[in-house]
Image (cartoon, helix red, strand yellow):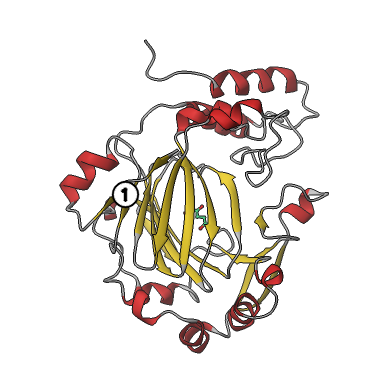
Amino acid sequence: VAEVERVGPIGLSDFKARFERPERPVVIAGGARSLRACELWNPAYLTERFGSVVIPYKLSRSHLHPDFHAQSLGQMFARESSTFAELLHAIGSGPKEERARRLFTGDERFLLRRRNGQTTIDPELGGLLDDVEVPELVPQARLYTVWGWFSGPGVRTWLHYDNNYCHNLNAQITGAKRCWLFPPSELGKLYPFPLAGQNPAHNCSQVDFEAPDLEKFPDFSGAERWEAQLSAGDLLFIPALWLHTFFHEGEFNSNVNFWWKPEQPLQSPVWARQVLLDAVAASGTDGKSSSPHAALLGALDRALQHAHYPKE
Ligand SMILES: O=C(O)CCC(=O)C(=O)O
Protein backbone atom coordinates (compact mmCIF):
# COMPACT_ATOMS: atom_id res chain seq x y z
CA VAL A 1 0.00 0.00 0.00
CA ALA A 2 1.39 3.40 -0.99
CA GLU A 3 0.22 6.81 0.13
CA VAL A 4 -0.65 9.14 -2.76
CA GLU A 5 1.79 12.08 -2.66
CA ARG A 6 0.36 15.36 -1.31
CA VAL A 7 1.72 18.59 -2.73
CA GLY A 8 0.93 22.26 -2.18
CA PRO A 9 0.13 24.72 -4.94
CA ILE A 10 1.65 23.48 -8.19
CA GLY A 11 2.17 25.14 -11.57
CA LEU A 12 0.98 23.66 -14.83
CA SER A 13 4.37 22.63 -16.23
CA ASP A 14 5.39 21.00 -12.96
CA PHE A 15 2.07 19.15 -12.76
CA LYS A 16 2.42 17.92 -16.34
CA ALA A 17 6.00 16.75 -15.92
CA ARG A 18 5.64 15.09 -12.52
CA PHE A 19 2.09 13.71 -12.60
CA GLU A 20 0.08 14.08 -15.82
CA ARG A 21 2.57 12.65 -18.34
CA PRO A 22 3.89 9.82 -16.12
CA GLU A 23 0.26 9.11 -15.06
CA ARG A 24 0.96 9.27 -11.36
CA PRO A 25 -1.81 10.24 -8.91
CA VAL A 26 -1.43 13.23 -6.62
CA VAL A 27 -3.44 15.21 -4.08
CA ILE A 28 -3.06 18.95 -4.44
CA ALA A 29 -3.80 20.02 -0.88
CA GLY A 30 -6.06 23.07 -0.87
CA GLY A 31 -5.95 23.16 -4.68
CA ALA A 32 -9.71 23.74 -4.91
CA ARG A 33 -9.99 26.20 -2.04
CA SER A 34 -10.26 29.22 -4.31
CA LEU A 35 -13.49 27.87 -5.85
CA ARG A 36 -16.49 29.88 -4.64
CA ALA A 37 -18.36 26.59 -4.18
CA CYS A 38 -16.07 25.77 -1.23
CA GLU A 39 -17.43 28.84 0.57
CA LEU A 40 -21.00 28.65 -0.61
CA TRP A 41 -22.15 25.07 -0.92
CA ASN A 42 -24.23 23.69 1.88
CA PRO A 43 -27.69 22.11 1.80
CA ALA A 44 -29.45 25.43 2.55
CA TYR A 45 -27.73 27.35 -0.25
CA LEU A 46 -28.20 24.56 -2.79
CA THR A 47 -31.85 24.15 -1.80
CA GLU A 48 -32.45 27.83 -2.28
CA ARG A 49 -30.84 27.94 -5.73
CA PHE A 50 -31.64 24.51 -7.17
CA GLY A 51 -34.13 22.96 -4.75
CA SER A 52 -37.03 22.70 -7.22
CA VAL A 53 -35.04 20.92 -9.94
CA VAL A 54 -36.20 17.32 -10.36
CA ILE A 55 -33.22 15.00 -10.59
CA PRO A 56 -32.65 11.28 -10.89
CA TYR A 57 -30.24 9.64 -8.43
CA LYS A 58 -28.95 6.19 -7.54
CA LEU A 59 -30.96 4.32 -4.94
CA SER A 60 -29.08 1.28 -3.66
CA ARG A 61 -30.39 -1.34 -1.25
CA SER A 62 -27.26 -0.64 0.87
CA HIS A 63 -24.39 1.87 1.12
CA LEU A 64 -22.64 0.21 -1.86
CA HIS A 65 -22.98 1.89 -5.25
CA PRO A 66 -23.67 -0.26 -7.14
CA ASP A 67 -24.43 -3.08 -4.72
CA PHE A 68 -23.32 -6.10 -6.75
CA HIS A 69 -24.66 -8.43 -4.04
CA ALA A 70 -28.21 -7.50 -5.07
CA GLN A 71 -30.38 -10.15 -6.74
CA SER A 72 -30.91 -8.55 -10.12
CA LEU A 73 -29.32 -6.02 -12.47
CA GLY A 74 -32.46 -3.91 -11.96
CA GLN A 75 -31.74 -3.67 -8.23
CA MET A 76 -28.02 -3.05 -8.74
CA PHE A 77 -28.62 -0.09 -11.00
CA ALA A 78 -31.87 1.21 -9.48
CA ARG A 79 -32.64 4.91 -9.65
CA GLU A 80 -35.30 7.15 -8.26
CA SER A 81 -36.04 10.81 -8.75
CA SER A 82 -37.14 13.71 -6.59
CA THR A 83 -36.52 17.40 -6.30
CA PHE A 84 -32.96 18.33 -5.41
CA ALA A 85 -34.34 19.75 -2.13
CA GLU A 86 -35.86 16.37 -1.24
CA LEU A 87 -32.66 14.54 -2.09
CA LEU A 88 -30.60 16.93 0.05
CA HIS A 89 -33.01 16.35 2.91
CA ALA A 90 -32.87 12.55 2.51
CA ILE A 91 -29.05 12.41 2.53
CA GLY A 92 -28.84 14.95 5.35
CA SER A 93 -31.13 13.51 8.01
CA GLY A 94 -32.41 10.24 9.45
CA PRO A 95 -30.65 6.92 10.09
CA LYS A 96 -27.17 6.68 8.55
CA GLU A 97 -27.90 3.45 6.61
CA GLU A 98 -30.82 5.15 4.93
CA ARG A 99 -28.79 8.28 4.08
CA ALA A 100 -26.10 6.15 2.43
CA ARG A 101 -28.56 4.54 0.02
CA ARG A 102 -28.77 7.65 -2.13
CA LEU A 103 -26.11 9.12 -4.39
CA PHE A 104 -26.29 11.72 -7.11
CA THR A 105 -23.58 11.68 -9.78
CA GLY A 106 -23.15 13.03 -13.28
CA ASP A 107 -24.12 9.60 -14.54
CA GLU A 108 -27.63 10.79 -13.90
CA ARG A 109 -27.18 14.37 -15.14
CA PHE A 110 -23.83 15.75 -16.29
CA LEU A 111 -23.08 19.42 -15.67
CA LEU A 112 -21.05 19.99 -18.83
CA ARG A 113 -19.99 17.94 -21.78
CA ARG A 114 -17.71 18.85 -24.68
CA ARG A 115 -17.74 16.69 -27.79
CA ASN A 116 -16.29 17.61 -31.21
CA GLY A 117 -15.98 21.25 -30.21
CA GLN A 118 -19.63 21.45 -29.05
CA THR A 119 -20.25 22.28 -25.39
CA THR A 120 -23.50 21.19 -23.76
CA ILE A 121 -24.40 22.50 -20.31
CA ASP A 122 -27.30 21.10 -18.31
CA PRO A 123 -29.99 23.81 -18.49
CA GLU A 124 -31.04 23.37 -14.86
CA LEU A 125 -27.92 22.20 -13.02
CA GLY A 126 -25.34 24.02 -15.17
CA GLY A 127 -25.80 26.97 -12.78
CA LEU A 128 -23.69 25.02 -10.27
CA LEU A 129 -20.77 25.92 -12.50
CA ASP A 130 -21.24 29.61 -11.61
CA ASP A 131 -19.47 28.62 -8.38
CA VAL A 132 -16.85 26.33 -9.94
CA GLU A 133 -14.27 27.41 -12.48
CA VAL A 134 -12.38 24.82 -14.48
CA PRO A 135 -9.02 24.49 -12.64
CA GLU A 136 -6.03 25.76 -14.61
CA LEU A 137 -4.44 22.28 -14.53
CA VAL A 138 -7.20 21.05 -16.84
CA PRO A 139 -6.50 21.89 -20.49
CA GLN A 140 -9.66 23.64 -21.70
CA ALA A 141 -9.12 22.42 -25.26
CA ARG A 142 -9.25 18.78 -24.21
CA LEU A 143 -11.96 19.08 -21.55
CA TYR A 144 -14.43 16.20 -21.99
CA THR A 145 -16.98 16.16 -19.16
CA VAL A 146 -17.75 17.83 -15.82
CA TRP A 147 -19.85 16.00 -13.19
CA GLY A 148 -21.21 16.94 -9.77
CA TRP A 149 -21.49 14.43 -6.88
CA PHE A 150 -23.69 14.76 -3.74
CA SER A 151 -23.97 12.27 -0.88
CA GLY A 152 -24.28 11.79 2.86
CA PRO A 153 -21.98 9.73 5.10
CA GLY A 154 -21.26 6.04 4.59
CA VAL A 155 -21.57 5.74 0.82
CA ARG A 156 -18.98 3.60 -0.96
CA THR A 157 -18.61 3.63 -4.69
CA TRP A 158 -17.60 0.20 -5.94
CA LEU A 159 -14.13 -0.26 -7.41
CA HIS A 160 -14.15 0.66 -11.10
CA TYR A 161 -12.26 2.50 -13.80
CA ASP A 162 -13.67 5.30 -15.94
CA ASN A 163 -14.09 3.85 -19.41
CA ASN A 164 -13.77 7.23 -21.13
CA TYR A 165 -9.92 6.97 -21.31
CA CYS A 166 -9.72 10.37 -19.58
CA HIS A 167 -7.62 11.91 -16.83
CA ASN A 168 -9.76 13.01 -13.89
CA LEU A 169 -9.29 15.95 -11.52
CA ASN A 170 -11.70 15.56 -8.64
CA ALA A 171 -12.39 18.61 -6.45
CA GLN A 172 -13.62 17.91 -2.92
CA ILE A 173 -15.92 20.87 -2.31
CA THR A 174 -17.41 19.91 1.07
CA GLY A 175 -17.07 16.88 3.34
CA ALA A 176 -14.32 14.28 3.12
CA LYS A 177 -13.53 11.10 1.21
CA ARG A 178 -10.99 8.32 1.42
CA CYS A 179 -9.94 6.87 -1.85
CA TRP A 180 -8.16 3.71 -2.91
CA LEU A 181 -6.48 3.68 -6.29
CA PHE A 182 -4.97 0.82 -8.27
CA PRO A 183 -2.68 1.26 -11.28
CA PRO A 184 -4.05 -0.11 -14.59
CA SER A 185 -1.24 -2.69 -14.58
CA GLU A 186 -3.04 -4.42 -11.66
CA LEU A 187 -6.21 -5.18 -13.60
CA GLY A 188 -5.61 -8.94 -13.70
CA LYS A 189 -5.60 -9.04 -9.88
CA LEU A 190 -8.82 -7.06 -9.60
CA TYR A 191 -11.17 -9.37 -11.52
CA PRO A 192 -13.38 -7.05 -13.60
CA PHE A 193 -16.77 -8.43 -14.63
CA PRO A 194 -15.81 -10.37 -17.75
CA LEU A 195 -16.85 -9.75 -21.30
CA ALA A 196 -19.52 -12.27 -22.28
CA GLY A 197 -20.39 -12.78 -18.62
CA GLN A 198 -23.67 -12.19 -16.77
CA ASN A 199 -22.97 -8.62 -15.62
CA PRO A 200 -22.43 -5.82 -18.18
CA ALA A 201 -20.50 -3.60 -15.72
CA HIS A 202 -17.19 -4.58 -17.33
CA ASN A 203 -15.37 -1.58 -15.85
CA CYS A 204 -16.19 -2.71 -12.29
CA SER A 205 -14.33 -5.23 -10.13
CA GLN A 206 -16.19 -8.34 -8.97
CA VAL A 207 -14.41 -8.10 -5.60
CA ASP A 208 -16.17 -6.54 -2.62
CA PHE A 209 -13.39 -4.74 -0.80
CA GLU A 210 -15.21 -4.79 2.49
CA ALA A 211 -15.39 -8.60 2.43
CA PRO A 212 -13.10 -9.96 -0.30
CA ASP A 213 -13.65 -13.60 -1.18
CA LEU A 214 -10.00 -14.67 -1.43
CA GLU A 215 -10.85 -18.20 -2.49
CA LYS A 216 -12.62 -16.92 -5.53
CA PHE A 217 -10.28 -13.94 -6.11
CA PRO A 218 -6.89 -15.14 -4.76
CA ASP A 219 -4.66 -12.56 -6.51
CA PHE A 220 -6.58 -9.62 -5.10
CA SER A 221 -4.56 -9.41 -1.89
CA GLY A 222 -1.36 -8.95 -3.94
CA ALA A 223 -2.65 -5.95 -5.89
CA GLU A 224 -0.68 -2.70 -5.55
CA ARG A 225 -2.90 -0.15 -3.84
CA TRP A 226 -2.52 3.59 -3.37
CA GLU A 227 -4.50 5.54 -0.78
CA ALA A 228 -5.51 9.18 -0.53
CA GLN A 229 -7.43 11.19 2.04
CA LEU A 230 -9.41 14.14 0.75
CA SER A 231 -10.64 17.09 2.80
CA ALA A 232 -12.73 20.01 1.65
CA GLY A 233 -10.70 22.13 -0.77
CA ASP A 234 -8.39 19.33 -1.97
CA LEU A 235 -7.93 18.24 -5.57
CA LEU A 236 -7.23 14.61 -6.44
CA PHE A 237 -5.66 13.74 -9.80
CA ILE A 238 -6.69 10.24 -10.95
CA PRO A 239 -4.69 9.35 -14.06
CA ALA A 240 -6.57 7.82 -16.99
CA LEU A 241 -7.78 4.25 -16.48
CA TRP A 242 -6.61 3.89 -12.87
CA LEU A 243 -9.12 1.92 -10.83
CA HIS A 244 -10.68 3.65 -7.85
CA THR A 245 -13.17 3.25 -5.01
CA PHE A 246 -14.24 6.01 -2.61
CA PHE A 247 -15.49 5.96 0.98
CA HIS A 248 -17.67 8.99 1.72
CA GLU A 249 -16.82 10.21 5.20
CA GLY A 250 -18.29 13.70 5.59
CA GLU A 251 -21.79 14.58 6.73
CA PHE A 252 -22.40 16.35 3.42
CA ASN A 253 -20.06 15.41 0.59
CA SER A 254 -19.98 17.36 -2.62
CA ASN A 255 -17.47 17.06 -5.43
CA VAL A 256 -17.03 18.32 -8.95
CA ASN A 257 -14.79 16.38 -11.28
CA PHE A 258 -13.25 17.30 -14.58
CA TRP A 259 -12.25 14.78 -17.24
CA TRP A 260 -9.96 15.46 -20.16
CA LYS A 261 -8.34 13.36 -22.86
CA PRO A 262 -4.62 12.64 -22.33
CA GLU A 263 -2.24 13.97 -24.97
CA GLN A 264 -0.26 10.74 -25.09
CA PRO A 265 -2.20 7.92 -23.41
CA LEU A 266 -0.07 5.16 -21.93
CA GLN A 267 -0.79 1.58 -22.95
CA SER A 268 -1.90 -0.74 -20.17
CA PRO A 269 -4.06 -3.83 -19.67
CA VAL A 270 -7.03 -1.57 -18.94
CA TRP A 271 -6.41 0.41 -22.12
CA ALA A 272 -6.04 -2.70 -24.31
CA ARG A 273 -9.06 -4.40 -22.80
CA GLN A 274 -11.25 -1.31 -23.09
CA VAL A 275 -10.32 -1.06 -26.78
CA LEU A 276 -11.55 -4.66 -27.15
CA LEU A 277 -14.78 -3.90 -25.27
CA ASP A 278 -15.42 -0.85 -27.45
CA ALA A 279 -14.63 -2.80 -30.63
CA VAL A 280 -17.03 -5.59 -29.67
CA ALA A 281 -19.75 -3.03 -28.94
CA ALA A 282 -19.10 -1.12 -32.19
CA SER A 283 -19.09 -4.28 -34.31
CA GLY A 284 -22.54 -5.26 -33.14
CA THR A 285 -21.14 -8.60 -31.93
CA ASP A 286 -23.17 -9.90 -29.05
CA GLY A 287 -20.90 -9.61 -25.99
CA LYS A 288 -23.37 -11.33 -23.67
CA SER A 289 -23.04 -14.74 -22.08
CA SER A 290 -25.46 -16.15 -24.68
CA SER A 291 -23.18 -15.10 -27.56
CA PRO A 292 -21.92 -17.90 -29.84
CA HIS A 293 -18.50 -16.22 -29.40
CA ALA A 294 -18.67 -16.13 -25.60
CA ALA A 295 -15.74 -18.50 -25.00
CA LEU A 296 -13.45 -16.64 -27.41
CA LEU A 297 -14.43 -13.20 -26.08
CA GLY A 298 -13.87 -14.37 -22.50
CA ALA A 299 -10.43 -15.75 -23.40
CA LEU A 300 -9.39 -12.51 -25.17
CA ASP A 301 -10.57 -10.49 -22.19
CA ARG A 302 -8.50 -12.58 -19.77
CA ALA A 303 -5.41 -12.45 -22.00
CA LEU A 304 -5.55 -8.66 -22.26
CA GLN A 305 -6.01 -8.26 -18.51
CA HIS A 306 -2.68 -10.00 -18.00
CA ALA A 307 -0.75 -8.34 -20.84
CA HIS A 308 2.41 -6.38 -19.99
CA TYR A 309 3.24 -2.92 -21.29
CA PRO A 310 5.50 -1.65 -22.64
CA LYS A 311 6.23 -4.79 -24.61
CA GLU A 312 9.85 -5.96 -24.33
O1 LIG B 1 -16.75 10.07 -5.29
C1 LIG B 1 -16.88 8.90 -5.59
O2 LIG B 1 -17.39 8.08 -4.84
C2 LIG B 1 -16.40 8.37 -6.90
C3 LIG B 1 -15.67 9.35 -7.73
C4 LIG B 1 -15.33 8.79 -9.06
O3 LIG B 1 -15.57 7.63 -9.34
C5 LIG B 1 -14.69 9.63 -10.05
O4 LIG B 1 -14.30 10.77 -9.76
O5 LIG B 1 -14.53 9.12 -11.18
Instruction: Identify whether 249 is placed above or below 5.
Output: below
Res. 26 visible in picture: yes
Q: Nearer the viewer, residue 59 or 297?
A: 59
Q: Residues within 10 Å of mark 1 (few under 14, many from 20)?
A: some
Task: Tell me the quarter of the picture where residue 92 sits.
Answer: bottom right
Q: Is residue 276 visible?
A: no
Helix, strand or loop status at disc 1: helix
Q: Residue at x 59, y 83 (%)?
A: 85
| Number of numbered callouts drawn | 1
Specify the quadrant of the image occupied by residue 59. Answer: bottom right
Q: Which residue is mark 1?
A: 142
Mark 1 belongs to which amino acid? Arg
Residue 15 sits above or below residue 103 on the image: above
Residue located at (65% from left, 42% from top): 201
Q: Would the CB of label 1 be found within 8 Å of ligand 1?
A: no
Q: Is residue 121 left or right of residue 91?
A: left
Q: Position of residue 289 (x, y in %)?
A: 77, 30
Q: Position of residue 232 (x, y in %)?
A: 38, 68
Front-lying residue, 268 or 209: 209
Residue 229 higher or lower than 161, as above or below? below
At 77% from the left and 36% from the top, the residue drawn is: 198
- Residue 269 at x, y = what percent? 49, 26
Judged left or right of residue 57, residue 19 is: left
**Image quadrant for the C terminus?**
top left
- Counting from the top left corner in percent of width and height, residue 258 is at 39, 56
Q: Is residue 149 left or right of residue 218?
A: left
Q: Quadrant of the N terminus?
A: top left
Q: Residue furthest top?
A: 312
